């Protein structure tokens, strides 16, 4: 008996140590900023929501994939990366006594964190489209002792009107459009946090609040989530550029000029390069450049995924070891890359952004992308960006940095201020 007890105590101590180390790191990195979110992360045992994984995996700052499409093997549900979870909880600002709706129950872990934030007087409703995920989330929440959570089987795009209105609504799945139901089910003064796919592969977790004319953003962070499934489905398609999976393009419904047949063999043509003179320092994010290019280019940016062999052979030279942002036009491909540049005045490392093109008209396309990089750097790099939802948006004005992204019901306006 004493051996079993000692093992139990040791396991509990190891669990606490791993959880504390994860939260300490998120606090040190500035991801966790509030005492409430920190307390929730320290309190809720993530390992109970990802059974079958080791404690080290459960408390690593990594997503844990929990369900895959049996036909394609593509992940369709996961326990999100803890730093993304924490970032979105900070955006949401849930407080004791609030009613919260979550779209995308997944493992139930995020709902448990929300329950800790709203306390016993609050209420969390979480919705998922898969009955097995709903059952699993209920079991995990019961094991973790989170009684103030209702797990509902349903289409997330419809919200859950039975428990509306909500003080806070958070989507933990990617959406191409903010569904009307979410806006209608939000209480006056409420806040919506949604990972919105804006254009092509560019997504941001955006905080929306009601404004005089529609809805306006109160902040946003880079975030990419698995897409909503159901009536709000935002399916992706993969184009194999090499025929053997070495280089692929992940495309979306707004990538209209993506002809797999026309692009076949594009990488077999000669390479052209267009360098921009635009520099970045290490660890500086490219997120706002990506957004600008996706707003400006006729075919928004797509993610080009690269196997190491394709990079090592020199077939492609992506911006990052296994990925780069790309655009296409007919049989032409252009993607972003970088090279070492002259150090800054203080000796800081710098990198120059460039564009590599393949295809019969790739030189013109590559130079077009490169020019937009320069325009962003010259006119918009140091400006803030705001997002609006309005049924009657002001027209696009690219010169002023205003772009209206078409949607069936709620167009998204992107504004460089």
Image (cartoon, rainbow, N blue to C red):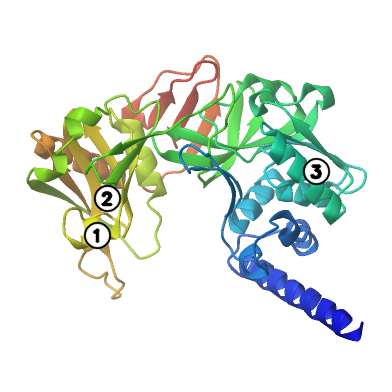
Q: What crowding class fits label 3: few (fewer than 14 Cα within 10 Å), some (14-19), or many (20 or more)?
A: many
Q: How many marks?
A: 3
Mark found first going from the N terminus, 2 or 1: 2
Dot 2 or dot 3, earlier in sequence? 3
Give the labeled residue for mark 2: 246
Could you tell me which residue is drawn at 57 percent across and 55 percent down? 63
Which corner quadrant of the image does residue 165 belong to? top right
Q: Assess whether mark 1 and mark 3 are in contact (beta carbons under 8 angstroms).
A: no
Mark 2 Cα-neighbour bin, 10 Å: few <14, some 14–19, many ≥20:
some
- Indicate the quadrant containing the N terminus: top left, top right, bottom left or bottom right: bottom right
Q: Which mark is residue 309?
A: 1
Q: Which mark is residue 138?
A: 3
Does 307 appear above or below 267? Answer: below
Tell me if residue 95 can be seen: no
**Dot 2 lies on which element?**
loop
How far apart are the alpha carbons under marks 2 and 3?
Answer: 40 Å
State the residue at coordinates (60%, 58%): 83
Nearer-N-terminus badge (3/1): 3
Name the residue nearer the viewer: 66 or 263.
66
Quarter in which the C terminus is drawn: top left
Give left or right: position of 331 versus 382. Answer: left
Q: How far apart, in angstroms, are the residues tagged by discs 2 and 1?
A: 7 Å
Residue shown at the point (13%, 42%) measured from the top left:
358
Q: Residues within 10 Å of mark 1 (few under 14, many from 20)?
A: few
Q: Marks 2 and 1: CB-CB under 8 Å? A: yes
The residues tagged by marks 3 and 1 sit, at their Cα atoms, a distance apart of 44 Å
Relative to residue 28, is residue 109 drawn left or right? right
Estimate the x, y position of residue 28 in percent, counting from the top left: 61, 70
């Amino acid at each position: 008996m004493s051996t079993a007890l000692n093992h139990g105590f040791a396991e509990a101590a190891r669990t606490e140590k791993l959880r504390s180390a994860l939260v300490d790191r998120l606090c040190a990195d500035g991801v966790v900023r509030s005492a409430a979110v920190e307390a929730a992360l320290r309190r809720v045992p993530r390992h109970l929501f990802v059974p079958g994984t080791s404690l080290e995996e459960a408390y690593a700052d990594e997503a844990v994939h929990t369900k895959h499409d049996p036909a394609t093997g593509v992940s369709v549900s996961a326990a999100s990366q803890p730093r993304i979870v924490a970032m979105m909880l900070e955006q949401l600002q849930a407080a004791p006594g609030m009613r919260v709706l979550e779209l995308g129950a997944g493992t139930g872990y995020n709902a448990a964190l929300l329950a800790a934030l709203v306390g016993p007087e609050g209420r969390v409703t979480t919705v998922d489209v898969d009955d097995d995920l709903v059952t699993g989330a209920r079991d995990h929440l019961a094991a973790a002792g989170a009684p103030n959570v209702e797990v509902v089987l349903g289409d997330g795009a419809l919200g859950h009107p039975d428990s509306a209105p909500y003080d806070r609504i958070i989507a933990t799945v990617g959406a191409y459009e903010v569904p009307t139901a979410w806006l209608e089910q939000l209480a006056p003064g409420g806040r919506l946090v949604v990972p919105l796919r804006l254009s092509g592969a560019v997504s941001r977790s955006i905080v929306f609040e009601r404004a005089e004319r529609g809805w306006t953003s109160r902040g946003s962070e880079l975030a990419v989530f698995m897409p909503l499934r159901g009536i709000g489905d935002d399916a992706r398609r993969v184009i194999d550029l090499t025929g053997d999976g070495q280089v692929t393009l992940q495309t979306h419904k707004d990538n209209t000029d993506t002809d797999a047949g026309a692009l076949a063999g594009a990488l077999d043509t000669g390479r052209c390069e267009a360098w921009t003179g635009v520099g970045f320092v290490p660890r500086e994010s490219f997120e706002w450049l990506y957004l600008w290019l996706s707003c400006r280019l006729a075919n928004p940016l797509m993610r080009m995924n690269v196997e190491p062999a394709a990079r090592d052979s020199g077939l492609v030279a992506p911006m990052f070891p296994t990925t780069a942002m790309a655009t296409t036009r007919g049989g032409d491909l252009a993607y972003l890359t970088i090279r070492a540049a002259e150090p800054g005045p203080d000796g800081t490392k710098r990198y120059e952004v460039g564009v590599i093109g393949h295809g019969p008209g790739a030189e013109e396309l590559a130079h077009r992308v490169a020019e937009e990089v320069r325009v962003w750097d010259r006119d918009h790099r140091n400006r803030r960006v705001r997002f609006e939802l309005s049924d009657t948006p002001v027209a696009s004005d690219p010169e002023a940095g205003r772009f209206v992204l078409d949607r069936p019901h709620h167009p998204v306006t992107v504004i460089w201020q």
